[in-house]
Image (tube, coloured by chain):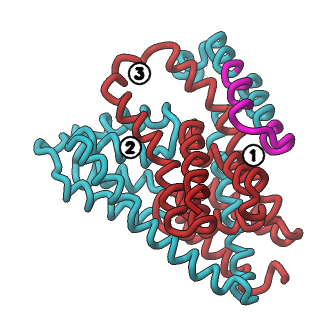
Chain colours: A red, B cyan
Amino acid sequence: MTSTVLTLLEIFARLSLLAFGGGNAVLPEMQRQVVEVHGWMTAHEFAQLYALAQAAPGPNMLVSTLIGWHVAGLGGALAATLGLTLPSCALTMAVASAWHRFRDAPWRRAVQAGLMPVTVGLIGAGALLLCQTTTTGWRAAALTAAATVLFAATKLHPLLILAAAAALGASGLLGG
Amino acid sequence: MQEAATAAPGLMELFMGFLTVGLLGFGGVLPWARRMIVEQRRWMTAAEFTDLLALCQFLPGPNVINVSAALGLRFQGIAGAVACFVGLMAAPMAVVIALGAVFARYAEVPEVRRTFAGLAAGASALVLATAIKIAAPLRGRIDGILVALATLAAVAWLRLPMLPVLLVIGPVAIALAWALRIGQSDAARRR
């Protein structure tokens, strides 16, 4: 039990410092760790927890709270959430006062511009891995495609789109 | 130009400010954080906020959480950072754990399962749309598109661990950006 909490802390702390481009960039690695490496849940359960976290208010990285909760209860929830947030916060606070000195440095721009497409690939990979389990048939695929267009191309409130998707699911549209 | 307020916000103010942001934001808290910090409470000017956000986007980690910690630190030291962090995270964590507990209990009920199938399809779409949106600046940049596709293939298809992927692709991507001076020619390309 305690060792599981510590393992969660260690995994999420490492993810925190790898999350170039924000929390969603580590979604594929998070899934690999909790599903494949540690076998704490199935890919399907992972996608469900991610979806549940989007239905709650707050930063979208609350999926870490749910994963920790699912694996080891309250201690796990705290370990995963603090693991994912504290290392990067500490780094940010340590670097903040020196930021103006390297903000306009050419290397800083090259690092950020270079890593940007890596972040695109990582978030794209996260999306594909989620789709793999949530696309249960052509109707689910159509729902995901339609919602993607609405998220990307309209100013509709994201919660509204999620609620509509949930309502369509509840109506039996996706079968099951 | 709008001025930032002169008095530094206290611990309670920092906590309350981020508490509202945490409870308002769905599918991304950043726009709400900006509104609270710059427009409503005027803790920072728009330029100061953009600068802080640039730092947090440069460094790893969930952006809005890094913003909250750095902002708290600036006004009230470590205690301020803790106040902002707890304000932002505590209530949403409680809500999400409650949702999780309810879901775990009723997951087998067919109606709940069907609702969740829809919600999960929508959540996948949210991540897909995020990827598409941030990929927009890659248009016409063959090098960037190749880097993005190589990362995608390594992580989603080959299922390689992230650290070695970053250690191999990261330096190559940065060297490419350096050689092509992408960061510096940003403004020029937009014209």
Mark 3 and mark 1 on one chain: yes
Report the amino acid beneath label 1: Ala
Using the image, tell me which numbered label, if any, was put on residue B67.
Answer: 2
Q: Which residue is mark 1?
A: A125
Residue drawn at x 32%, y 57% is B18
Q: Is residue B82 above or below residue B53?
A: below
Q: Secondary structure at mark 3?
A: loop
Report the amino acid beneath label 2: Val
Using the image, tell me which numbered label, if any, was put on residue A103.
Answer: 3
Could you say which is closer to the camera, residue A159 or residue B70? B70
Residue count near mark 1 (Cα–Cα under 10 Å), binned few <14, some 14–19, many ≥20: many
Mark 1 and mark 2 on one chain: no
**Would residue A42 be found to the left or right of residue A94 on screen?**
right
Magenta residues span B152-172
Q: Is residue B29 visible?
A: yes
Residue drawn at x 44%, y 71% is B94
Q: Is residue A30 above or below residue A21?
A: below
Q: Secondary structure at mark 2?
A: helix
Report the amino acid beneath label 3: Arg
Coordinates of residue B91 in the picture (x, y in percent)? 39, 68
